[in-house]
Every structure is written in C-alpha cells, then in structure tokens.
Amino acid sequence: MYTLEKPKTGYEPATHDDFKNHVYFLTNRAVNPTLEDCYYPKNKILPSEDIVYMSWIDKKTNEKRTGNRTIRYIPGETSVFADEQSSIDIPRNRFGQIIFVDGMLVVDGRDKLKRQYLDLCNWNRSNSEFRMPGKPEIFFKEDKERKSENIIDTKKKIYELQGKVFECTESELQAYCMTFDVRNYQALNVNEMRTILLDMIQMDPNRFEKEMNSDERKRKYWVMKAFEEQYLQVSADRAKIEYTLGGIQTVCEVPSINTNHVEYLTDLSFRSPETNELIEKLIKLMKTPSFTTNRSGLDVTSNDSENEILYKEALKHKVLYKAGPWTRFSDKSLNDINLGKSMAEFCELIDNDLDLGQKIKMMLSEIKEG
C-alpha cells in the first residue's frame, strides 16, 4: 500500500506576493545631478551577506534562540539563514548578485530568497528600529497597495469635505473664508466663496480638515466677529485690545504694534480664565437675535424681565435710540457709551453695571415726570 506525496521543497505555499514584481529604490537621491536625469549611481551593488539581531526557533533543537544571525542570498538554497543552508562554507561565486540599476531594483515575486533577504537586511529603511550599529539605510521598498489606499483615502476625504462646503449656508461660507484668511471675502458672492474653499480642499485636504474641526479656528471666528461687530477694538496706539460695551475697557495689552490682535486674543482666551469668560459672553451675545424696534416690539409684556422693561421703556421715551444696529444714549454727551445691538446685550450689560442701569432709570423718570 502506498500514496503519493508532494515533494518537500522547503518553500512555503505560494501567495499573492509570488505573482507580482517587488520594487526597491535607493534612498539617497541626488538633488543636483552632475548629469541630466542621473539622480543615482548607474549601478549600486548591495552585499549579499549580512548579520542581523533576531529571535528564532532552532529547527534542529526546536528551542527559541536570540542573538546575531547570518543571512545570505544564495540562489538554489531553501533559506536565507546560513545555519539552515546546505553548508556554512559556501564559495562566494555561488552568492547571488543584488544590483540597483539607476536607483531601482525590480525583484520577481518568485525569487523568494532575494525578497526575504532584502526584507530582513539592515540596509532596508523598514528595519531602522532593529538596525545593527554602523549599518546605514540604503534602500526602501515601494508599497503600491498602501500607496493606492492612501490615494483612495485622500480622494474620499476631498469628496466628503467638498460635500460639506456645498451644503454650507452663506453665513457659514463667510465664517470659513474669514478664518481661512481669504482676502476681500466680503466682496465675494456665494459661488466665488464656495469655489475658493473647494480649491483649498483640493490642494491640502488634511490641513483643511484639521483647521475646519479645530477649537482654535472656531474661537478665532468669534473673536474676528467681535472685532467686526465693534464689541472689541484695538486702541489708537495699537498697544491694547479694548472692550466697548458700556464704555471703553482694556481687555489686555499686546506685545508689540506688529502683533496680530486676533491671533493673540484667540490664544489668550485659552490661557486666561478672565479673557475666556469675556469671549464666551460675547459669543452668547452675538448668537442672540437682535431686538427689532418697530412699534409693536416696544410693547411691554408680562414675560419681560426688569431690564427688558427698562430697555423698551427707554427706547419708547427716547432716552435711548437705535443708531443703525447699535443702541445709544440720545444725550450726545453720552454717545460714546456703547449699549450693544440687542436687548439681550443691553440686559447683560446692565447686570454687570448697576450704576449704568440706575442712570437710565433716573433719565427715564425725569422724562416721564417732565
């Protein structure tokens, strides 16, 4: 009785890698070649023998060993490890040649020994963590599959980010243009803003995504908005940043006249609890819809707070008036006092300045009595 068996070749079963070419490139590419298009030596011969430090199972004793191990590329052998080859003393003329031509080496997938040797030797960039002292990096392997995955991931990211930009409202587009420092964005229409942002995504999707989702950019938007809405301003000598509601107050001093006040205040708001509290208050005020001053809007309701009643009464009796979006004193001597744009801003201001609230009450009382 007998059965046929597969011949023992010492090789593992064929894999996908056995049916494709593997490409290796020299690391040192000349920046300024002496000859046109000659960025590498014409031929670069890599030694066919090396010593690596590794752990392995000894096939003879079946024990785990750790230490230096000699690897050799010798065609016809069943292993690259010298201790597993047919003889320790194999003549040099049997060693295979490993030659990079014009900076490139293409290895047939079926040449497993050469592939294994290149993957294990010290000169491979991938082995930098395990490299023996004194051995330089000489080459790296092109990973086409990983490269393709990266391309697909990048294209997917561009598609997703551009989709978000297509869905943006005009105010959202303005916010992105503002924080991405698009010049003269106020003069651009919706399609022009959207086109610029789409181009920015195409050029560097990773940077755009990082900036889009960063807390710094979101905070920067509100700081810029506060300057735009004149809640904040830079002093005439450019030495201070000032808060304008209820009179001019210093928020902070700036290091120099060349300091970018938006960037500086944005960064300071993450480091200073007091500045952060101010910016959070301004964000809340800017998110609150403006109060309309039509006749019906001045009517006092049962749901109004004391400060809301004061605001409506002061407008109704012309103690205050609306200067464009802003609320101001009718008394020209007090016209430099900024009372905000909305009723919510006014109420917030009065809560923090009882003397100012008392002044408005007295002025309102005088008008009603007189």
Image (cartoon, rainbow, N blue to C red):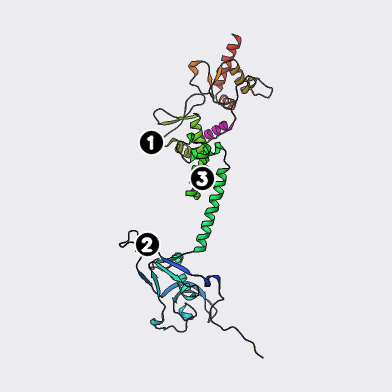
Q: Which residue is mark 3?
A: 198
Q: Is residue 13 above or below residue 274?
A: below
Give the label, 1 or 3, closer to the camera: 3
Q: CA distance from mark 1 to mark 3?
A: 32 Å
Work out which quarter of the rendered image holds the N terminus and state it.
bottom right
Q: Nearer the viewer, residue 348 or 143?
A: 143
- x, y percent for residue 265: 47, 36
Front position among marks 1 and 2: 2
Q: Nearer the viewer, residue 154 or 53?
A: 154
Mark 1 in CB contact with mark 2 (< 8 angstroms): no
Question: Residue lying furthest left in this view?
Answer: 34
Q: CA distance from mark 1 to mark 2?
A: 42 Å
Give the percent coordinates (x, y) of residue 219: 52, 39
Residue 122 seen in the figure = no
Secondary structure of the residue carrying tag 2 is loop
Q: Residues within 10 Å of mark 3 (few under 14, many from 20)?
A: many
Alpha carbon separation for disc pair 3 and 2? 34 Å
Residue 285 counted in the magenta span: yes
Question: Residue 99 occupies which quadrant of the picture?
Answer: bottom left
Residue type pointed to by label 2? Arg
Residue picked out by circle 2: 29
Q: Amino acid at mark 3?
A: Leu
Marked residue nearer the N-terminal end (1 or 2)? 2
Q: Which residue is mark 1?
A: 258
Q: Residue at x 59, y 83 (%)?
A: 6
- SS label for mark 3: helix
Residue 110 drawn at (x, y percent): 50, 75
Q: Is residue 277 above or below residue 314?
A: below
Provide the residue span drawn in magenta: 274-292
